Amino acid sequence: ADTVYALYHLSADQVAEQSVYVSTGATAEEIAVFAAKDETAVKQIEQAVQKRLQTQKDGFADYLPAEMDKLNQAVIVTEGQYVIFCVASDAGQVRSVVHSFLS
């Protein structure tokens, strides 16, 4: 949890539950699912996810520019108390799967 909070600049005060998987840095793939503690935290988590995405874009732009397509099509979905962030090669499939779980 401490690593996740450091990556996303969040705290336990904002997050009720979280599950995050990040690549080793060789690719941009990442998935994060957050359950916010309250409505204010939802907005803070959304902002944190946007900042994380920008940080990744800045880092990969020169390092591995081939990963930029994935980052430019990153999926961010907010539903109720949940914020979901995913960077993958098939954003359409990701959206479909996320929405099937949230329906």
Image (cartoon, grey):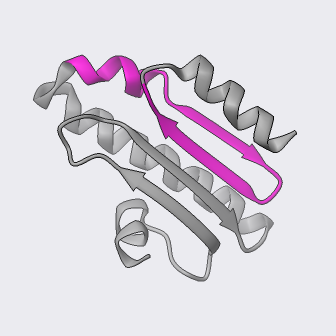
How far across and down, in percent of the image, does residue 47 sit? Answer: 56, 52
Q: Report the quarter where the C terminus lies.
A: top right
84 is higher (above) or lower (below) than 95: below
Q: Residue at x 77, y 33 (%)?
A: 99
Q: Where in the figure is residue 36, as x and y percent of width and height?
A: 70, 67
Say which quarter of the image contains residue 25.
top left
Dividing the picture into quadrants, the one containing residue 8 is bottom left
Q: Position of residue 22 (x, y in %)?
A: 35, 50
Quadrant of the snapshot with the N terminus: bottom left
Residue drawn at x 25%, y 35% is 58
Q: Is residue 97 left or right of residue 21?
A: right
The residue nearer to you, when weighing 21 against 58, is 21
Question: Would you say residue 85 sits in the magenta stretch?
Answer: yes
Residue at 74% across, 66% down: 40
Q: Nearer the viewer, residue 61 or 93?
A: 93
Which quadrant would residue 12 be assigned to in this image? bottom right
Question: Residue at position x 60%, y 38% from top?
Answer: 76
The image shows residue 3, relative to residue 88, as above or below, that is below
The magenta stretch is 66-88
Q: Relative to 31, does residue 48 appear above or below in the rendering?
A: below
Q: Position of residue 66 (x, y in %)?
A: 22, 17
Q: Residue furthest bottom?
A: 13
Q: Is residue 98 left or right of residue 63?
A: right
| Residue found at the far right of this picture | 103
